[in-house]
Amino acid sequence: MIEHLEQTDVLVIGGGLAAMYAAVHAAKTSRKVLMISKKKVGLSGSSLVSMSVHRYAPQTEALKEEYAGSFKASGRGINDPRLMERLVQQGAGQVAALKEFGLPLQFKTRDYEGKAYPYLACCAPKFGRNLTYPMRQYIESRTNIDLLEGFMAVELVTDQDQVKGVVAEKGNALYFIQAKAVVLATGGAGYVFENTSNTCDLTGDGYAMAIRAGLELQDMEFIQFYPYRAYSPAQFDIFPDIFAHGACFLNEKGERFMAGYPKKEQENRDVLARCMFSQKEVILELSGCDPDYLEKECPNIYEAFNKYRDRRFLVKPVAHFMMGGIPLRLDCSTNLKGLYCCGEVTGGMHGANRMAGSALTEIAVFGPVAGVHAAEFAARQCKGEAGAFDVDPLAPELGQDDVSGIRQALRKTMWTCVSLVRTGQAMNDARKEIDALEKQLMQIKPMDLRPWFECRNMLTTAKCILGSAILRRESRGAHFREDFPAEDPEWTGNILATDWIARFIKAKVQ
Ligand SMILES: Cc1cc2nc3c(=O)[nH]c(=O)nc-3n(C[C@H](O)[C@H](O)[C@H](O)COP(=O)(O)OP(=O)(O)OC[C@H]3O[C@@H](n4cnc5c(N)ncnc54)[C@H](O)[C@@H]3O)c2cc1C
């Protein structure tokens, strides 16, 4: 039995920065806005744990061109040029506009022909929570946005190619929330991998819901593995600029294995991460780093450095960012009428790899677009009574089974076979394993619905990643295949993954 819980104009799904920016901009149009989030709004997802760094194109033609050139090179030429152009033109203005919400951003400038141009904004210290907490405060104190927290969106409800709301779960009960327009901002899926910098709520729900609603996903084979994550004796993110201030990586033999690369430890993330993956151990060497710089710019590292003075800091690459997702359009619309998307759940902007600091800038540009367009769509819909839509998601009978074994097996398989170094053989083995895990999941009676729903979404997302990675028979950006180690000019199109639940991929190279 599904209870009809709420009716709203705009429903925003997610509690990260993309969702919050979309919601506040939708609310400015006086539409009724409701946010639902699995965890607390502003206290969950990658936005919370990010380093708050926004890099963007300085607003002068020569530097804009330089930025666009680096962006395209990083994406290995398969970024959508219209999205990139929008980011280049509007990034600086939209990041500056965040001051409206009281976000404590500090702006850094770069000199060009005698003039200073802002190119980067971040908090001090560089903690994402310095953005997400004030954003939540702004929502609570300055808007009429309603928050439903602890609710997991399970299924998009559609009627004749139009979204009508979602089914959401809380405490093993299912609810229907009706909406005239929906913004999907559920973030990425790092938790599908055993080693990740993402929080555990990022189980690929948005991708899986989109696939089940008949949408396509693009570029799902491209996952950024972040090379700057210390895991022992303390866990922290390493701000890459410290490598320009005397820090370096050494392997277990004490060799600086990046010494031969032009940008050394600041090499493109995919190249650096793969070099790290092939070492037995990677150690962060800080003895050459100025302590005053560390204390001021990286207090988390400074603290760990002082606490564990005699210990070696071990580092490994971790699954960090999904370049792929629901194809992003300039107006954030999708193939489902009334459904808009923004943030990491989208794909197309970054191509085969993402440039540092560009995800938060993308959200500053496209979060508001998603919110405003969703509100405008909602305004065009008639008033409408509570609808009698087909809202019957596949939900298992409850029992005593635990899904954690299946989840852990999936995460391990994805790390072993589909992470930094891939082969057709290993990925085909992974495919069989994932099929078997899916069969197991369908047969069990879980203790609670939430972990079962999440695990199903992780399996669906994993299949999209895997299928796309099997199909791309070359290496490009973050996707490296040992059996096809070279980039192939034949493969400059995007792979589309659809309908994995029916156990096939309809993928094509455009
Ligand atoms: C450690 C780390 C550091 C980073 N640093 C930077 C940086 O400095 N600069 C930069 O540009 N990028 C950075 N990134 C990337 C960037 O932070 C993310 O891409 C961005 O914050 C994603 O924002 P989002 O709102 O799309 O998703 P998230 O912030 O991940 O939020 C997703 C939200 O959706 C909720 N949710 C998920 N599924 C459901 C569901 N089914 N129902 C309801 N709610 C759901 C989650 O609980 C969460 O609240 C970093 C990422 C990490 C992990």
Image: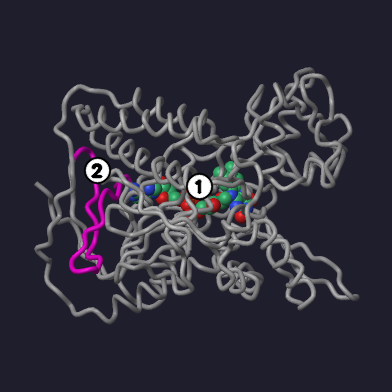
Kindly identify the residue that appears in the image at 56 percent across and 67 percent down: 80
Mark 2 and mark 1 in contact (Cβ < 8 Å)? Answer: no
Please name whichever residue, 396 or 361, is drawn nearer the observer in this view of the structure.
396
Residue 26 placement: quadrant: bottom left
Q: Is residue 385 left or right of residue 179?
A: left
Dot 2 corresponds to which residue? 170
Please, what is the three-letter code of the amino acid marked with disc 1?
A: Glu
Q: Residue at x 29, y 80 (%)?
A: 379
In this rendering, the answer to whether 378 lies above or below 430 is below
Element marked by disc 1: loop
- Does the numbered disc 1 mark a residue whose Cβ is under 8 Å from ligand 1? no
Residue in view at x 47 percent, y 55 percent: 495
Three-letter code, disc 2: Lys
Q: Which mark is residue 221?
A: 1
Verify whether residue 178 appears in magenta.
Answer: no
Magenta residues, dominant SS class: strand
Residue 498 x, y percent position in the rendering: 35, 54
Which residues, given as a range, are shown in magenta? 150-172
Residue 165's quadrant in the figure?
A: bottom left
**Distance from Cα at disc 1 to Cα at disc 2:** 32 Å
* 183 shown above or below 256: below
Q: In screen coordinates, is 169 left or right of 272?
A: left
